Image (cartoon, rainbow, N blue to C red):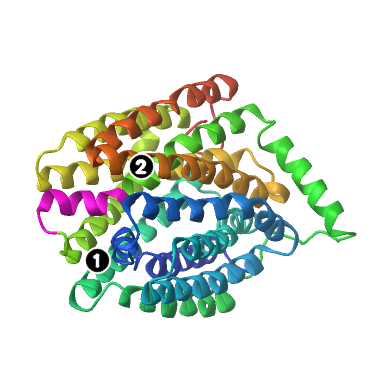
Amino acid sequence: MMRPEQVLRTYITLMTVSTAASSMIWGVNTLFLLDAGLSIGEAFAANAFFTAGMVLFEVPTGVVADTVGRRTSYLLGTVTLTGSTLLYLLLWQTGAPFAAWAVASVLLGLGFTFFSGATEAWLVDGLQATGYTGSLDAAFAKGQIANGIAMLGGSIGGGLLAHVTNLGVPYVVRAALLAVTFVVAWLAMHDIGFTPKPRVSVVTEIRGILRASLDHGLLNPPVRWVMLAAPFTAGVSMFGFYAAQPYLLELYGRSDSYAIVGVSAGLVAGAQILGGASAAYVSRSFRRRTTVMLVATGAVVVVLVLFALASNFWGALVLLALWAVLFAAIAPVRQAYLNELIPSAQRATVLSSDSLLASGGGVVIQPALGRAADVWGYGPAYVIGAVIQLLALPFILLARRSHTVEKLRVPVAA
């Protein structure tokens, strides 16, 4: 029988190895697409197809996690991501048309949907089954710190690799590290506190799980309003992170300094570490989780406007770090808020539905802001993004009003 600390350690290990693999390309992905011959608009349209893949497959893969198992879902994700990463590399080498990039991006989205929901559900199930008495906020914060450390190494390493070799090498390394991730998950990840449901028919299973997930998700007001805020915050953050690569190079004055964008992505990772480490302070400073979400989301709007108006590289870099800290501070609080309100049997599916809505925002917002950057430049596109981010605030306020519980089992209340 595993102990709670073993479950948490396994979760942190999985977060570290998967993020280290994935983040090898995060600092250079937009530049990689532009180098392949895509325009700015096409590059963000490719990203939109990635998020469209997540929209299409979020719920079906969440059902896999809730019926077959969290471990199976995770393993399928590593295999799919490895194959689609290698396909990206092939398209770059052959100068493929945009349609091929769209298909490959959808497959990348499929790979990540096997991860989303399943990993969080595995952690919460395991902690509850082994008698964990600590705070979920603290558990997720530790994962966030590990995620930030792995992203720090991966993104800086990917940028440096691209700088001394070419933009394709980080993708080769990413595929190799994903294969290592599969081995780690195979050996260390076993479903605990979760029993696969007896299956009568696939259609019956899917209908029953989706019905239950709706009851505990969009039909549950405190959960619904937080989920409906996700398209605005996630869509803007997706554009904000990837557009920062060419925007910072534009401010820096050198379009081929890939090490700089790797370091800037590493700075975002460092900010994630700081944001995760601040979870305990946030817990003491705010009585309700929705207060944290409101304050941080509003602050992000201000930072995005200042980032858009930045006139030099170093000032923009500081603002990018501040934005990342705010984003990282929200994440563990939001995760704990949702997980406290979702039963185990529907947890992966509801969390996948949440990711689906977030990805849906990315499908619409990313190409729209990408087109705005094409026409007016990156600065105006970030201002538009800040306005879109504002639209999340009313939904968080509704969540606050619909959830009347002032104290939960954990230090921070909903």
Which image quarter: residue 269?
Answer: bottom left
Give coordinates of residue 25: x percent, y percent: 34, 66
Is residue 149 depicted above or below 231 in this figure?
Answer: below
Q: Residues within 10 Å of mark 2 (few under 14, many from 20)?
A: many
- Give whichever of 373, 238 is nearer the camera: 373
Q: Residue placed at 21% from the left, 48% from the top? A: 247
Q: In the rendered structure, which segment of residues is drawn in magenta?
A: 242-254
Q: Disc 2 designates what residue?
A: 371
> Is residue 188 magenta-colored?
no
Is residue 69 depicted above or below 93 in this figure?
Answer: above
Give coordinates of residue 172: x percent, y percent: 38, 79
Q: Mark 2 is on which residue type?
A: Arg
Give the main secondary structure of the magenta stretch.
helix
Q: Is residue 71 visible?
A: yes
Q: Which numbered marker is on residue 156?
A: 1
Q: Quadrant of the N terminus?
A: bottom right
Q: Nearer the viewer, mark 1 or mark 2?
A: 2
- Give whichever of 152, 194 is nearer the camera: 152
Give coordinates of residue 220: x percent, y percent: 67, 30
Q: Which numbered marker is on residue 202?
A: none
Q: Mark 1 is on which residue type?
A: Ile
Give coordinates of residue 327: x percent, y percent: 35, 42
